Image: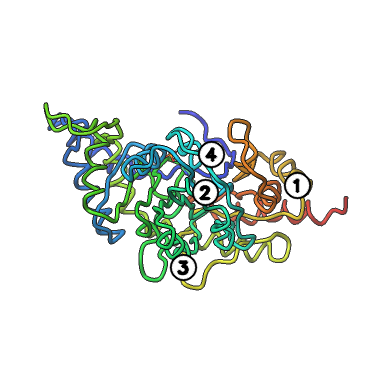
Amino acid sequence: MKKKSNKINVTKAFLPPIKEYKKYIDIIYANSHLTNQGPLLLELESKLKAYLKVEHFHFLTNGTLALQLALTALDIYDGEIITTPFSYVATCSSIIWGRCKPVFVDIEPDNYTIDVKKIEAKITKKTKAILAVHVFGYACDVETIERIARKHKLKVIYDGAHSFGSVYKGRSLASYGDISTLSFHATKLFHTIEGGACIVKDKSISHKLDLQKRFGHNLDEHLILGINAKASEFQAAMGLCNLEYIQKAMETRKKLCDLYDKELHGLVGRPKVQANLVYNYSYYPVLFKSENELLRVFKALGDKNIFSRRYFYPSLNTINYVNGESCPISEDISLRIACLPLYVELGSGNVKKISQIIRDTLQIKQ
Ligand SMILES: *Cc1c(COP(=O)(O)O)cnc(C)c1O
C-alpha cells in the first residue's frame, strides 16, 4: 500500500467509511439504475430539502451548470448582470457563458460580500439581475438586495456554493433569492464528488428548470430548450453517506477555527461574521497586511509541505476575457487574502504547527 503522505493541502475531501458507500453501490448494481432521476437521487433530494428546509430543490451534476441553469430558468439570455468580483471564476464565467455582461460592484471590506450601497449606481436599462455570492459562507445583505431588486424589477440569484449549512435569521442561507445555487464539489464542505443544486423560490420556474436540466423534453414531447445537468446515482450515494456526517464535520471544523483564532490573534485580519448568522465553518480566510507578507508565509508553509490557497485571486474584474471596471477594494483584498488548511482530519496539532510557522514568519522583521 502507498505510504500516507504528510503533505497538508488547503482542503481534503471528506470520505465516509467505504463500507457505507459500498452498501449504496450494491443497491445501484442490484437495480441497474445508474442515472436519470434514480431512487438514490430522489432520496438525497428529499433529505436535502428537509435539511435545508426548502421546497423546490434540484440536485444537479455540478455548481457551474446550476448557475447557468439559474439564468436560463429565469429567462435571462442577454443584458447586464450585477455581480461581485470576489469569487471563484465560475460565478463570472457563467454570466459570460450565458451571453450576458457581468457588471462588477465592489465588495464590503468587512466580510467580502457585494457592497449593497454601491449596487444602485450600476443599474441601467439593460440590467436583468443581481448575482451575489455568499462568499466563504458569510451572508450577503439579503434584505437590502431584495429591496433593490424589487424596486428595479430585477431577479436575484445567489451563488451559494459556500453557503451549505450556514443559517441566516433562522433560514438556510441557501433559501434566499429567486434562485440560489450550491456546489457539492469534492473540495466543498458537503460534497457528492461532483455535484450541485438549484433552490428555486417559484414553483413554475422550478418546473421549468426541472425540464431544462434534462434536455427539455418528456419522452417524445420536446417542450423547451434544455441541457444535460442530471446527476448520477453514484454522486447521490456519496451525498447520502456524507449527509450523515455533516453536523459532526461542522462541529470539528468550528473547533479548528476557534483554535486558529486563538493562535493567530492580532496577527492577521479576519472577517466580521454577521450577528444573525450561524456560520458553517466552510473556510478559514485570513487577511495579511500586504501581498509580500502573504508570499513570505506561503514560502515558509511550502517549505514544510503545507499548502494554503489564494482564495480568491485575482479579482475577477481583472482577468483577460472579462476586462471589467475597477474594483479597488476587491483588487486590494485579493492580493492579501488566503485560506488556511481546514478539513475534518486536519487535527489541532496541525493547526498549532501552521499557526506557529505563521507567527514565526510574521514576527521576523523584513
Ligand atoms: C466551487 C464554486 C463554484 C463551482 O462549482 P462546481 O461544482 O465546481 O462547478 C461556483 N462558485 C463558487 C463561489 C465556487 O466556490
Task: Name the residue tied to disc 4.
Answer: 89
Gap in Å between the C-alphas at discs 2 and 3? 22 Å
Disc 4 or 2, which lies upstream in sequence? Answer: 2
Q: Are marks 1 and 2 in contact (CB under 8 Å)?
A: no
Gap in Å between the C-alphas at discs 3 and 4? 25 Å
Amino acid, disc 4? Val
Question: Which quarter of the rendering shows the N terminus?
Answer: top left
Is 274 drawn above or below residue 76 in the view shown?
below
Task: Name the residue tied to disc 2.
Answer: 83
Locate residue 117, reporting x and y percent: 58, 63
Amino acid, disc 2? Thr
Mark 1, Cα crowd under 10 Å, few <14 / some 14-19 / many 20+, is some
Q: Are marks 2 and 3 in contact (CB under 8 Å)?
A: no
Mark 3, Cα crowd under 10 Å, few <14 / some 14-19 / many 20+, is some
Q: Which label sits in the foreground, 3 or 4?
A: 4
Q: Which label sits in the foreground, 1 or 4?
A: 4
Task: Name the residue tied to disc 3.
Answer: 277
Q: Regarding mark 1 in the picture, which secondary structure is present there?
A: helix
Q: Which label sits in the foreground, 2 or 3?
A: 2
Q: Is residue 356 left or right of residue 158?
A: right
Gap in Å between the C-alphas at discs 1 and 4? 21 Å
Nearer to me, 245 or 281: 281
Q: Residue at x 61, y 62 (%)?
A: 271
Q: Regarding mark 2 in the picture, which secondary structure is present there?
A: strand
Task: Name the residue tied to disc 1.
Answer: 291
Disc 3 or 4, which lies upstream in sequence? Answer: 4
Tell whether circle 4 marks a residue whose Cβ is less than 8 angstroms from ligand 1.
Answer: no
Q: Are marks 1 and 4 in contact (CB under 8 Å)?
A: no
